[in-house]
Image (tube, rainbow, N blue to C red):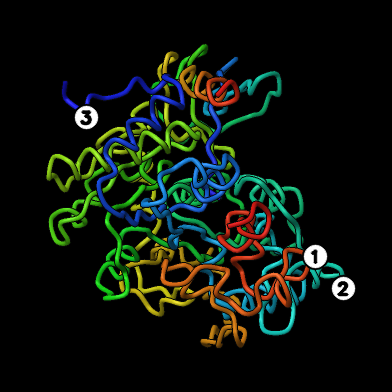
Amino acid sequence: MNQCNRINTVGNVDSMLMGISRLTDRTFRFMEVCGTHTVSIFRSGIKSLLPKEIELVSGPGCPVCVTPVAEIDRAISMAALKDVTLLTFGDLMRVPGTSSSLSKERAMGKDIRVITSPLDALEAAAREPERKVVFFGVGFETTSPAIAASVKEARVRGISNFYLLSSQRLIPPAMKILLSSKDAKIDGFILPGHVSVIIGKEPYSFISDEFSLMGVITGFEALDILEGIYMLLCQNKEGRSEIEVQYKRAVKEEGNPLALEIMKEVFKTVSARWRGMGMIPGSGMALREEFKEMDAAEIFDISCEDKPDAPGCLCGEILQGIKTPKECSLFGTRCTPQDPVGPCMVSSEGSCAAFYKYGG
Amino acid sequence: MCLGVPGKVVSINEDIAEVDFGGVRRDVSLLLCTGVMEGDYVLVHVGFAIQRLEKEDAMETLQLLEEFIRG
């Protein structure tokens, strides 16, 4: 019988684990790129169920974690301007800047609010025309189309006090940089499910074409992840290096063409700095010239100079799968979820926060 | 941060759908998703439907959760 027959996804955990054990003929180091996978892996205890030869490492797929200190500082400075209301996603609030955080600034009386959709920022701007409403938009390809649609909607509705402070990033260019490093030592990727709902399969083709590595676009439930690992092992067994889709119920090969079109209409790709990884060409998104009247970075003219990460913080190496949280001298002592030093401990999707909460 | 939650479209008013997430109802924008009809299942991220799901596929997520709980 072919060892790599697809196991029915709605099978049971035991049969999936038996399949994985049967195909584990050497050590493997797989990277889960997405922070949502990291949380699911820890919460479900998958690491303790896998053969000891399989190591799972977290990658740079937590948008909060890769946002550099300078961009947090810039948002803090913007919130201090007269008549400005700054809105952002909750995960950003406690990320330490150089000397403060958005959460601390709000406690000091600044008008900083948490929202769950960029459309909430639009509504706030419509409701309070006397305020300059700045949306600090952080996210990957999953989130960018929603931000782009909100920018377009602001124009359609004639809302002139809505501004975007863009801190968005693209996953494939960062993965390419990661793979170009000699420290990478990765055998395959558990690729992000919801980024791929938007971008589809093709943008990952360099993983197999240029680096002869394998990747499986994977869903977020525990059995999805086990099947993703099983599919990687099948590729290894059969000597293939391809990009496959496990998360077929949501990911189409071509992604979401309408979302991609809207994203492209509103944003242009630019170089962006990633925490711990430096400047990565073509990995950021800025508003196109046609939307510059909503570009907070242009309108409010606050500098965004590069700042060093907190001394001793290993978030940069951890984001690239080079170090684990337990190798950081600050982990669990000076850096805890209650009083975080680095962003990987702040975000619930950060490696350090997951290690702290669930154990390594 | 890339969470996506499947829900069932209860009603549609232009480009806004009322979506039921296991009893909790929320307004969701359809600006990023074409051809969504009442009764469809959609995957929702930050207030936007980002993909239309086949009913069986949406159910698979729920079955997977149940399967894992039963172990």
Q: Are marks 2 and 3 on the same chain?
A: yes
Give x and y (percent) for residue B57. 42, 19
**Residue drawn where x is 52% and y is 28% of the image:** B15
Q: Chain of mark 3?
A: A
Q: Considering depth in this image, is B32 or A122 the residue closer to the camera?
A: B32
The quadrant holding residue A114 is bottom right
CA–CA distance in space, label 2 to label 3: 59 Å
Q: Which comes sooner in the sequence, label 1 or label 3?
A: 3
> In the picture, which quadrant includes the C terminus of chain A?
bottom right
Q: Are marks 2 and 1 on the same chain?
A: yes
- Which amino acid, by three-letter code, is at mark 2? Met
**Camera-nearest label, 1 or 3:** 3
Q: Is residue A45 left or right of residue A209?
A: right
**Camera-nearest label, 2 or 3:** 3
Residue linked to disc 2: A108
Q: Chain of mark 1?
A: A
CA–CA distance in space, label 1 to label 3: 56 Å
Q: Is residue B27 depicted above or below A344 in this figure?
A: above
Query: Considering the numbered disc 2 on the image, is that residue within a helix, a strand or a loop?
Result: loop
Q: Which mark is residue A111?
A: 1
**Camera-nearest label, 2 or 1:** 2
Q: Which mark is residue A4?
A: 3
Query: Considering the numbered disc 1 on the image, is that residue within a helix, a strand or a loop?
Result: loop
Give x and y (percent) for residue A283. 36, 66
Q: Is residue A199 depicted above or below A282 in this figure?
A: above
> In the picture, which quadrant includes the N terminus of chain A?
top left
